[in-house]
Image: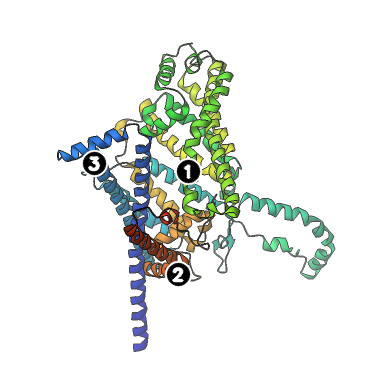
Amino acid sequence: MVDTEEGTDGENEREYHRVLTRVSHAATRGASVGMGLRGGLHVASYALRLVSSVAVRRRQRRGLIMIRHGRESGFQATVKKILRDTAAHGLFLGTFSASFVMLDEGIAYVFGRERTRAWRALLSGFLSGPSLMLTGVFRDGTNDRHTSLAIYLVLRGIMLLVRCGNIPLEEDDSGRLAPPPATTYSIEARRSDSMKEQHSAVGQEAGSCVVSQKRSTNGGKRAATAAEIKKPKVRRAWIYWLLTPTRFAYGDVVLMCLATAQLGYSWVILPSTLPGSYIKFLNTHGGKSPLVLEGIRDVCSRRTRRMPCDIVHPGQSCSGHALTFFPRAYLRALPVYIPVYIVPALLIHRQKLLQKGNAARIWPKIVKGCLRSSLFLSLYCTLAWRGVCVGFQTTGKSTGTIIASSCWVAGVALLAEKKSRRMELAVYALARALESFSMSLVEWGYVPKSKNLPRIDVLLFSIATAAICHCYSDHNGKRRDVFAGKYLNVFDFIFGNTGFTNSGRIRHVPTNKDLVAMAGETGFGKRVRSFARSIGNDLAALSRNPSIPSSISSLSLDSDDDAERKYM
């Protein structure tokens, strides 16, 4: 009896230590990821702003003069703002990660791990959502709103729930309905199943005599075929039927067309409903000066018979304007996508880009992706203007409604993009469109301004995290496959969870101490030490010879082949 009590106490102590370790690791890893992402974005955007500015040297000189006079320069203010915002986002993501893990473990301890397997992560994710308010903790009591981010995450959560709903359910050993382990049900899988059934139809007809004989021996009951035995038992057919539109192959294009209708209207008629940075992006790639947009807005507000085509392309026909607009739009799109494809390639395939065999395989993919994405953006802008011209010429009217009902055709340009990128672009554009539409309702007078919730972004973020965490961890992680591999790896790293055992226990990722030890034993750690030794040797040589050592510019660290992820 004493041994049993001692064993129970030891097990409880180990469980307590496991939970405490998991919470602390989630906090530190979440904070490091938040600070790394936010800080990296700030540094990249500030560097691009300095490079693109014409008066960089003048501002730097002015900053030095202000420092000499004891004032705070613009550079110092920017650095402080970047540091505060980076620290706030690290605090937010660290708090969210620790709160989710703590609530998840606490609910499992109080109410039972098996009893709460279907809703534990959903509730934990929802209750951890208010940590978003920490992003404004360093702003004198005022908080920044993150409505765009919250709406985007809500759409991502809905998309994950739809994927879960499209997974067929089957009965497990205990008779409970659950998705098959580590399987996803895609359109290609259904097509392959139908093809197998068609090919096996002849064999089933040929074996009809055998089936009839088995019926006589089994009391008149027809014996099940092999295909019927392997086919999962699908329940809740009404949910699967309700989600039929979501299995449409070109659903991403439809969403893009709907988003484009609202974005085109808001850009021309109600630019106040869009963020300033997004307006600047549209003005650049729309290829028209603000005076042209103001002229179109003025004509549409007066509801005159004058065609805005005279303002958009004076002295040109609508088709001629489209033909001359497209090449210039393509040249404007190239600088946008060149860093999008080049920078990740340099980070992931630094050394292989210089090897003949691998370079011949990677560089064509980079060039092809850059050209294809530039084609999408330029074609998108061209079709938007051409669609608006067709709407004006067909109806003979110039209103904001005509703009919204004709510029949607630009969404068809999404077909030029890679299939794996279409839904990402469509969801991003739809998030911007929904935010703009909600603000347009206020401008139109349908929603009073006093009815606006003060922090609607926190509520939306909580709903989004509830849906995402539900798909990630509930039902013992049987729906984890709806996540893309890159997102699933990040979730596993932060939350310390790589799946579940048969008893519902969590499989943990290595601890921080284990990761450091593993890094020292692998080739990556050896290369880090080699890199440090080479730097020391170069510095010693530099002290003897002031010339710049050539090895410093040629040094690069490459990730392990086993840990390398597929690019594109």
Q: How many marks?
A: 3
Taking the spot 52% from the left edge, 63% from the top edge, the residue there is 562
Q: Residues within 10 Å of mark 2 (few under 14, many from 20)?
A: few
Q: Is residue 103 among what the camera can see?
A: no
- Specify which label sits upstream in the sequence, 1 or 2: 1
> Outermost residue toward the front?
545
- Pair 1/2: label in front: 1
Disc 1 and disc 3: Cα gap in Å? 29 Å
Residue type, numbered disc 3 = Ala
Q: Compared to 229, does 440 lie above or below? A: above
Q: Compared to 220, does 356 lie above or below? A: above
Residue type, numbered disc 2 = Arg
Label 3 residue SS: helix
Taking depth in this image into account, of 384 and 263 the one nearest to the observer is 384
Colour treatment of the image = rainbow
Label 2 residue SS: loop
- Do the numbered discs 1 and 3 sit on residues whose CB atoms are within 8 Å? no
Label 1 residue SS: helix
Residue holding disc 1: 340
Residue 212, image x and y in percent?
A: 82, 64
Residue holding disc 2: 505
Taking the spot 37% from the left edge, 59% from the top edge, the residue there is 538
Taking depth in this image into account, of 419 and 261 the one nearest to the observer is 419
Residue holding disc 3: 77
Residue 536, image x and y in percent?
A: 35, 62
